[in-house]
Image (cartoon, rainbow, N blue to C red):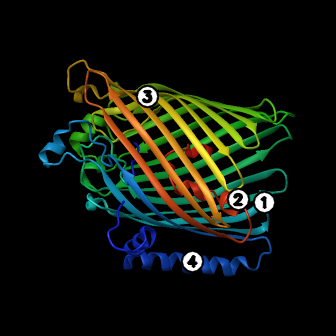
Amino acid sequence: MRMPVHFVEKNNQSPLSAMTAASLSPAVMHESAKILMLFALMASAASSFASSELVLQLETSLTSDSNPLRFYEGSAALAQNGNTDTADKVRGIDLRAGAVIPVLSDRTRLILTGTLGKHSYRHYDNLDHQSKAGDAMFDYAIGDIVSGRINAGKEDRLFQYINGSLTDKDMSHYSQQAAELTLKITDELAIPVKTERSSLRYDLGVNQLYNFHQQAQQASIRYYSPTGSNIEAGLRLSETDYPNRNQQQFADLDKHYRETESFLEAEWKYSVKTVASTHLGLIRRRYESLHELDTNLFSTLIRATYFYSPKLRLDMQLWNRPFSIVDPSILYVIAKAARLDAQWKISDKTQFNFSGLLQDSDQKLVPRLAEFQNQLSRKEREIRLGFGMSYEIDRGLKLSIDSVAEKLTRDGNLPGLRQAIIKVGLEYTYENLPGSAAKMGLKRYQHSLSNSDALR
């Protein structure tokens, strides 16, 4: 699954003021008022702690997207609509907030974060939507032996359109609850354990066969070397249910499977400038009824970071891993990719970032649903280039540009797709302690186009 994102003004108002006025509908103002009231209460509670942190962000943006529904080139759906223009423009306003409240110490604290956004399309106005997300995390530590985190989160966002076959508006609703505990045996040895529940559901009936509930447990043993490197080996068990599948979908795709993943993770601090890490996992998936779909999957992620200078950071990622996609003919997708990211801080006020991705995907088809007999897979190649920059106009006020260009080709001379997105945003951040927004991870709500979310 993946998701795209998209401009315009007509009167004499400035683009940002026009966009802000149009985006702040009564419903959004009502939701914003509730969030502001919540954080006013948090600020009041936080005032009793000398080291509490509070952050409030407001971002307005204009986005141009050449293909928000990701139509294939020469798509029949476009011709049927009598339209050959796939592009659209979007106005957006997003409110983000967070608070860190120490409970007993800086190591035992409550972290609350959330976002509320309104996004309006010029042509595809049926895609107008509100995005929402919120997370509550409780970090705890008992002496030097026990530490961990309890967290719960929810996110509502627009469906990640894939290939133009779906043009109706759909919203996805994701929730997760997890508890982690790490028992430190010695300075070199620790045992982390984790349990979590997650669920995903869609509003649109055609996608509800992918509504799922998942439960997982994980345990591992981790070794720390004196140089700061570490290695971890563990086991993850999970069960996934699809409760909304009908009898035919059950017969084609099943409605329950179990996975067992044996994994090895390591982080190697080669020097003060170079760090490398890896995740190796062997996944054994077993279905409840359709045993012909049982499979063994291999997941690999290798990452290396090189700090060339205090101003320039380079990151490389290589992966070979499976993921799911909302297409009833595709069981899963195996993606092999190489990605390079560069972050260049020219000055205290100006920063650039660049990225390049080359990914080959192998879509494993459900045999009984394949278009052609004996066709077991379809292949795609994706090339994506990203560019972003930010400039701090004044303390707390930042202008940013985020963009990406993508080309997708498919085997068998099938039509591919192209997409180019550019977003211009103006963001104001209030934080009572410098660096609080970064510490709370508020950037995860922005879903960067040009930067890898894992590196932000």
For label 2, the crowd category at 10 Å Cα-Cα, with few meaning under 14, some 14 to 19 and many 20 or more, is some
Residue highlighted by disc 1: 107
What percent of the width, then of the height, locates residue 413?
26, 22
* Up/down of 254 relative to 139, above or below: above
Instruction: Classify mark 3: helix, strand or loop.
Output: strand
What percent of the width, then of the height, locates residue 170?
31, 56
Q: Amino acid at mark 3?
A: Ile
Instruction: Classify mark 4: helix, strand or loop.
Output: helix
Identity of the residue drawn at 43% across and 43% down: 240
* Up/down of 167 relative to 333, above or below: below
Residue highlighted by disc 2: 139
Q: Earlier in the sequence, mark 4 or mark 2?
A: 4
Identity of the residue drawn at 67% across and 57% down: 438
Name the image quarter holding residue 431.
bottom right
Separation of marks 1 and 4 at Cα, in angstroms? 24 Å
Q: Amino acid at mark 1?
A: Arg
Separation of marks 4 and 2 at Cα, in angstroms? 21 Å
Q: Earlier in the sequence, mark 1 or mark 2?
A: 1
Residue highlighted by disc 3: 334
Would you say residue 266 is visible in this rendering?
Answer: no
Query: Mark 3 or mark 1: which is in front?
Result: 3
